[in-house]
Image (cartoon, rainbow, N blue to C red):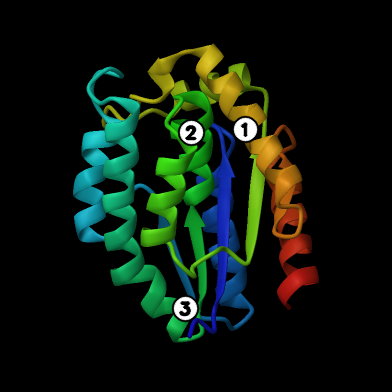
Amino acid sequence: MNTGCFITLEGGEGTGKSTQSALLFKKLEFAGHQVVQTREPGGSEGAEKIRQLLVTGNPQNWSPVAEALLISAARDDHLRRVIAPALDHGKFVICDRFIDSTTAYQGVASGVDRELLKVLETHVVGKFTPDLTLIFDLDPQTGLERAKARAQDGEDRFEAKGLTYHQKIRQAFIDIAQKHAERCVIVDASLGVDDIEDRVWQIISDRFL
């Protein structure tokens, strides 16, 4: 039985999710909570190895279906080794990307069959639906420029897929937020870092604290 709080941060490239994840981690810890900060793809030893296959190299290295399968394999390891144990111990889990990214990137933008993605979600994710998903919304052109400026270790495979691809992703996240309004909140990622931090903390405080 998961008794903790599972918060996911979603959005396109360069939307500031990683920065806000780190800031939220510090605030929750300062408030006296036990917190795990993690990411996808990755977050566990096995999943980080798979991450390198996914986020580096030529954009054509993997088909969309192969991407979905690799991400699901990474997610399975991540859930079993990191997320599930933390939630079972009553901790806050902050995860930079989760299942909604698979829907947006591999499903909507890349055209992977929705039934396949649903089967993978059912068998891998199971009961671990996020309690809250923050969707950071930003013009894709701006986001790609930001992502290019901070690119490191060659992790730019998805950025290299082009503006049209990322425009589809932005719309996919907006659609997800509308479809799952009970758990999703859109955050304006064009604001300054401090303003976004304040907005995120307001949302977390209103829901959980």
Q: Residue at x 48, y 33 (%)?
A: 107
Q: Is residue 162 left or right of residue 181?
A: left
Tell me the amino acid under the disc marked 3: Leu
In this view, the residue in front, 60 or 24, is: 60
Tell me the amino acid under the disc marked 2: Gly
Q: Is residue 110 above or below residue 88?
A: above
Q: Is residue 13 visible?
A: no
Q: Residue at x 54, y 84 (%)?
A: 3
SS at circle 1? helix
- Mark 2 or mark 3: name the one nearer the start of the chain: 3
Q: Residue 65 in the image: x percent, y percent?
A: 32, 32
Question: In the rendered image, which quarter is residue 33 located in?
Answer: bottom right
Q: Residue 204 in the image: x percent, y percent?
A: 71, 66
CA gap, disc 3 and disc 1: 28 Å
- Mark 3 or mark 1: name the one nearer the start of the chain: 3
The residue singled out by tag 1 in the image is: 172
SS at circle 2? helix
The residue singled out by tag 3 in the image is: 87
Which numbered dot is residue 107? 2
Q: Is residue 198 left or right of residue 1?
A: right
Q: Residue at x 64, y 79 (%)?
A: 31
Q: Is residue 12 above or below residue 123?
A: above
Q: Is residue 66 left or right of residue 33?
A: left
CA gap, disc 2 and disc 1: 9 Å
Q: Is disc 3 surrounded by few (<14), some (14 to 19) or many (20+) residues within 10 Å?
A: many
In this view, the residue in front, 102 or 191, is: 102
Question: In the rendered image, which quarter is residue 84 located in?
Answer: bottom left
Q: Viewer-nearest of labels 2 and 3?
A: 2
Tell me the amino acid under the disc marked 1: Ala
